[in-house]
């Protein structure tokens, strides 16, 4: 589980450069989803994987279709 204090400051690394209100992330299960561009970042063992390449990989995947077992995500 990611602490709320961390969730409050995390932003999508690709979108944050667009301004103060950009790159806000929503927590959905074991995923952080960018409100701006729908990039999806997995949370592995309580640690968000905030790599743009990973976020882009799942951009077109619906939330209900995201892998539940994120231990295999590379």
Image (spheres, rainbow, N blue to C red):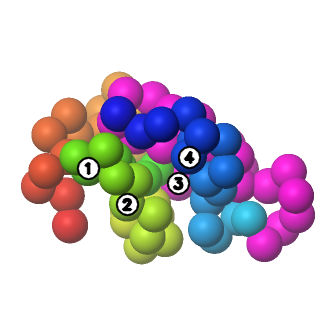
Residue shown at the point (61%, 68%) measured from the top left = 13
1 vs 4, front mark? 4
How far is mark 2 from mark 4, CA to CA? 13 Å
Binning the other alpha carbons within 10 Å of mark 3 as few (below 14), some (14 to 19) or many (20 upward) gives many
Q: Which residue is mark 3?
A: 39
Q: Earlier in the sequence, mark 3 or mark 2?
A: 3
In contact (CB < 8 Å): disc 2 and disc 1: yes
Between disc 1 and disc 3, the foreground one is: 1
Q: Check disc 4 and report the residue beneath it.
A: 6
Residue 5 percent across, percent down from the top left: 60, 40
Question: The C terminus lies in which quarter of the figure?
Answer: bottom left
- Tell me if 70 is positioned left or right of 54 in this view: left
Disc 2 marks which residue?
Answer: 49
Residue 46 at x, y percent in the picture: 31, 44
Q: CA distance from mark 2 to mark 1?
A: 7 Å
Q: Nearer the viewer, residue 43 or 64?
A: 43
């Amino acid at each position: 589980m990611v602490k709320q204090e961390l969730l409050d400051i995390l932003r999508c690394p690709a979108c944050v450069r667009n301004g103060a209100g950009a790159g806000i992330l929503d927590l959905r299960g074991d995923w952080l989803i960018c409100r701006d561009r729908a990039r999806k970042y997995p949370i592995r063992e309580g640690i968000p994987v905030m790599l743009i390449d990973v976020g882009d990989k799942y951009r077109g995947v619906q939330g209900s279709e995201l892998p539940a077992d994120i231990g295999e995500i590379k």
